[in-house]
Structures are given as structure tokens and as C-alpha cells.
Amino acid sequence: MRELLKRQRVETGASAVEYGLLIAFVAAIIAGSVAVLGALLPGLYTVPF
């Protein structure tokens, strides 16, 4: 019975791997936003002649 209880131990909290994945996800969103804005902003500053 004790072996069964040891195997069913619930781990709480986030591990370093989960934090790393979260940081990578946020970095990907930021990089995508910068890329999109970088492509759109030059059109706002050009003067049509």
C-alpha cells in the first residue's frame, strides 16, 4: 500500500522547464509583434509624392 501512495505523489508548483517554456512563448510573441510592427511602420513615415 505504501508503494502505491508513493507513486501517486502529487507535485505542486512549476518546475524550471515549465518556466522556460513560458519564457520562450512570451519571447516568441514579442519577436512576432516586433516583426509585424517593423514591416508596417515604414509605410507610415513615407511621404507620397
Image: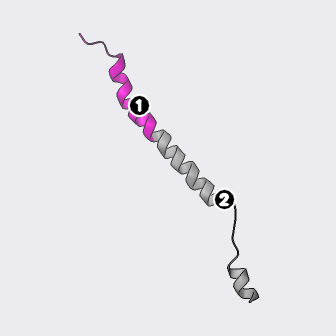
What residue is shown with label 2? 14
Residue at coordinates 76% horizontally, 87% vertically from top-left? 2
On-image quarter of the C terminus:
top left
Label 1, secondary structure: give it. helix
Observer-nearest of 13 and 20:
13
Q: Please report whichever mark, 1 or 2, sits nearer to the chain's N-terminal start.
A: 2
The percent position of residue 44, horizontal first and vertical second, equals 35, 19
Q: Is residue 17 left or right of residue 32?
A: right
The percent position of residue 32, horizontal first and vertical second, equals 43, 40
Residue lying at the far left in this picture: please name it: 49
What residue is shown with label 1? 37
On-image quarter of the N terminus:
bottom right
- Residue 36 magenta-highlighted: yes
Q: Which amino acid type corresponds to the residue marked 2 in the rendered image?
A: Ala
The quadrant where residue 41 appears = top left
Q: Secondary structure of the magenta portion, mostly? A: helix
User: Is 49 placed above or below 32 here?
Assistant: above
The percent position of residue 18, horizontal first and vertical second, equals 60, 58
Q: Residues within 10 Å of mark 1 (few under 14, many from 20)?
A: few
Residue at coordinates 54% horizontally, 50% vertically from top-left? 24
Label 2, secondary structure: give it. loop
User: Is 23 placed above or below 41 here?
Assistant: below
Residue at coordinates 45% horizontally, 34% vertically from top-left? 34
- Label disc, if present, on residue 16 of the rendered structure: none
Q: Which amino acid type corresponds to the residue marked 1 in the rendered image?
A: Leu
Magenta region, residue range: 32-49
- Residue 26 magenta-highlighted: no
Residue at coordinates 36% horizontally, 31% vertically from top-left? 39
User: Is 17 placed above or below 48 here?
Assistant: below
